[in-house]
Amino acid sequence: MVFALQEQLPREYEIKRFDLPDMSHREMDELLRSHILCRISFHDEPYPYTLPMEYYYFGDVMYFHFTTTGKKIELMNKNPNVTVEVDWANDTLTDYRSVILKGKLASVDNQTEREIVNVAMASAVHEKAGIKSFLQIPWGKKGVDYLSASNIPLTLLKLEIQEMTGKKAH
């Protein structure tokens, strides 16, 4: 549609490409650490399957709790490559930041990693309402895998990040 319009406009009204400035790795890291909600897109036909998800970002790794059944698990099992987006904007949209991550979801099978991440996740979201609060998952003691404490079967996954880009406006 834009291209069709551009062909009809006089030359002085040409649409010029505008790129927002890139975010530094530090800026992307700060944004990812300060939020807990993202949009994750899975490969599906004919359109991507996108949904909001809580996430936890520690040490340059993004972690997710998924239920063990449902559409996102089916799609992940077919193709574990996903795109994740996290953004922030002020009320007037004069300041805006967005980070896009591309990578592969993988199960966290190492018990030590699971325990460390679960304790860190419990600390990070203890005061914030979210799905864990809704499901009434108890905030476990150190070393307890609180995934198994819920009546809802959950699995811990991590995003093996292949690409991370960020844009900002202010």
Image (spheres, rainbow, N blue to C red):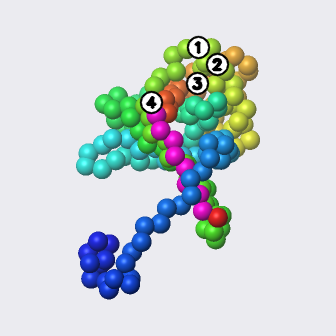
| Tag 1 residue | 111
Estimate how packed mark 3 is, as few (under 14), some (14 to 19) or many (20 or more) residues with alpha carbons within 10 Å: many
Question: Tag 4, which secondary structure?
Answer: strand
Mark 2 to mark 3 CA distance (whole Å): 10 Å
Quarter of the view holding residue 104 = top left
Nearest to N terminus: mark 4 or mark 1:
4
As helix, strand or loop, the secondary structure at mark 2 comes to helix
Residue 66, compared with residue 89, is above or below; it is above
The three-letter amino acid code for the residue at tag 3 is Leu
Whether residue 134 is visible to the viewer of this picture, yes or no, is no
Q: Residue at x 36, y 38 (%)?
A: 71
Q: Residue at x 52, y 29 (%)?
A: 158
- Let me know if residue 26 appears in the view: yes
Mark 4 — residue?
Answer: 105
The answer for how far apart the CA atoms under marks 2 and 4 are is 19 Å
- Identity, as a three-letter code, of the amino acid under mark 4: Leu
Which residue sits at x=26%, y=78%? Answer: 7
What span is colored magenta in the figure? 162-169
Residue 76 % position (x, y): 37, 32
Proximity of marks 1 and 2: CB atoms separated by less than 8 Å: yes
Identify the image quadrant of the C terminus: bottom right
Dot 1, how many residues are within 10 Å of its Cα: few (below 14), some (14-19), or many (20+)? Answer: few
Which residue was labeled with disc 2? 115
The amino acid type found where label 1 is placed reads Gln
Mark 2 belongs to which amino acid? Glu
Would you say the residues marked 3 and 4 are in contact, meaning their CB atoms lie under 8 Å apart?
A: no
